[in-house]
């Protein structure tokens, strides 16, 4: 489980690093954006449920994973840019794992189904939101047209339901994260979108 | 008291939803901005005083109120836009209630008069600040010319003084929130402003 | 030690106030930006390590120091602008003191060397990051070309090492903060920069 977490943090770290490289930040900016993108979602969740200091800050392995993601981008970004489709897949995996892990941890800390599901979403997308705010942009998760938050909510919600039904954790994680990952990738490849307020259709 | 809180969260949720509709976000963006605008001020206060998980996250009624404010905006925004003057009134009511409730809760948690007053302001304007940061804008409370933060500070300060004098809570809430609401509405209708650094006068 | 802290908060408060004056905010905006710039780094650290309410919020002396920095800027900003070189020096001093104090406090709360160093950086630059996000800008610490975060990390790291070696606290603070301050000032005067991703060199 820790290895899976580390991988997700590493991949999200790369996504933060890529943003920083695109903004032409120096190595400090790349390292900082990589780290907060990889760990920020977990920090938000842990501060909100009261698990402080957050493991994503006190455990050097997590710090290192996210930081490495950022630094590797600093040195290898042209190669990584060519790997964009692969990054997309890893990002979906990270989203699925973080959302499910966040919902499970919130449940463990005594939160009800609805708050736990929301904290799953916070864990999954929080790092990216912090990345975008620091980059001076409206968070991608709000702007993007293809589905991102809804698959995360679905996975988090399934994880909560599964735990409440006392199903085995491994099964819950695999199924719930799997739903998020597959749904997210299909949405990305096929351009599935969420409904928009109707004025958009009229005036554009 | 809970009903009053729910109403304030609902109205702030509408204000977040309106921002999201104006930005042409999809239903996810409208729901997220509505929720954080309705609940964000309380989350900030609760994280700062150590009441975690914040009731505004663990209590599904609060979540639902803010979320409903966002979602109703998604479906009814043209009607709501026509109700702008009414929204203004409700926003002032929300500001008054949140500022006073925030100051009282901070006092309960042992904070002195000055910190408690500031936490009242944080509770009152925090949701809107998060909304504006996520929307990529300088927070309205900083930019706006008509008074907004000062009436909130006044209400929060009055609430702290009233509690310290052991006056009955209902009286304190009604008077303190009333001062904020009336002052805020008068400022909005009459264009009352706060002093600006003097260069503004010279160079504009 | 408290006096040194107060001075650093006051100077950071001025820097927040100057940003607000440049944005033509009114007195509320100047006071708010001054306060969060002076205290925000400590708030972030304290929320992350679980020392809530943060002393930077519950202690009226800290609140007053940061607020005064903001308000003095409101009234005296033309004079302060002429003092820019002096502000630069004080900003370096604030950075050094905050980074070292942050790292020491995190160590006291049981965090390991790597997290404590990072929390030193958070304490040193956090207020400025919040200031810039509220001002709608990419944080200066990410954008600036001359070294800022690296001297802060160096001071925080030295403080952690010194404490672990059981050296006397005064010595640790003086040497570690001194390294940050001198390095930061030299970087500012001589234009020392950190490495950038190589495309920058190619395409500019």
Image (spheres, coloured by chain):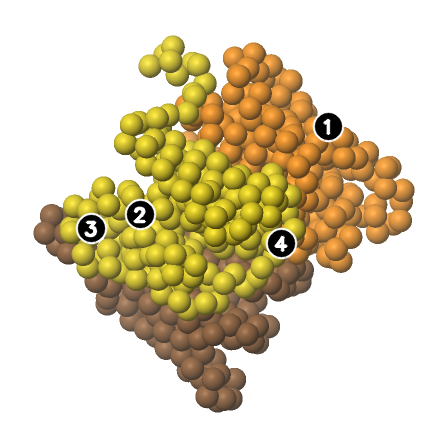
Chain colours: A yellow, B orange, C brown
Q: In this image, A94 relative to A44: left or right?
A: left
Is residue C119 at all visible to an observer of this figure?
no
Mark 2 and 3 residues: CB-CB less than 8 Å, in contact?
no
Which chain does the residue under circle 2 lie in? Answer: A
Q: Which residue is mark 4?
A: A109
How many marks can you see? Answer: 4
Q: Are marks 4 and 1 on the same chain?
A: no
Tell me which residue sits at (87%, 49%) in the image.
B165
Disc number lying in front (2 or 3): 2
Mark 1 and 2 residues: CB-CB less than 8 Å, in contact?
no
Tell me which residue sits at (32%, 36%) in the image.
A185
Q: Residues within 10 Å of mark 1 (few under 14, many from 20)?
A: some
Mark 3 and 4 residues: CB-CB less than 8 Å, in contact?
no
- Indicate the position of residue C29 as horizontal and vertical percent values: 53, 43
Q: Nearer the viewer, residue B118 or A94?
A: A94
Q: Nearer the viewer, residue C115 or C63?
A: C115
Mark 4 and 1 residues: CB-CB less than 8 Å, in contact?
no
Q: Secondary structure at mark 1?
A: helix
Which chain does the residue under circle 3 lie in? Answer: A
Disc number lying in front (1 or 2): 2
Which chain does the residue under circle 4 lie in? Answer: A
Q: Secondary structure at mark 2?
A: helix
Report the Cα–Cα distance between label 2 and label 3: 12 Å
Residue B182: give its label: 1
Q: Secondary structure at mark 4?
A: loop
């Amino acid at each position: 489980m820790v290895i899976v977490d580390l991988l997700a943090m590493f991949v999200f770290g790369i996504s933060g690093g890529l943003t920083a490289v695109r903004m032409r930040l120096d190595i400090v900016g790349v390292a900082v954006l990589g780290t907060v993108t990889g760990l920020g979602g977990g920090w938000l969740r842990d501060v909100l449920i009261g698990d402080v200091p957050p493991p994503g800050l006190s455990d050097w392995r997590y710090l290192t994973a996210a930081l490495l993601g950022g630094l590797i981008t600093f040195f290898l970004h042209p190669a990584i840019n060519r790997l964009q489709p692969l990054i997309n897949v890893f990002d979906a995996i990270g989203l699925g794992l973080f959302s499910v892990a966040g919902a499970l941890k919130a449940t463990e800390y005594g939160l009800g189904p609805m708050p736990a599901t929301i904290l799953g979403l916070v864990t999954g997308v929080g790092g990216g939101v912090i990345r975008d705010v620091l980059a001076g942009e409206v968070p991608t998760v709000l702007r993007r047209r293809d589905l991102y938050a809804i698959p995360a909510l679905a996975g988090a919600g399934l994880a909560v339901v599964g735990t409440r039904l006392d199903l085995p954790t491994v099964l819950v994680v695999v199924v719930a994260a799997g739903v998020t990952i597959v749904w997210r990738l299909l949405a990305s490849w096929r351009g599935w979108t969420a409904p928009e307020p109707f004025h958009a259709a009229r005036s554009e």
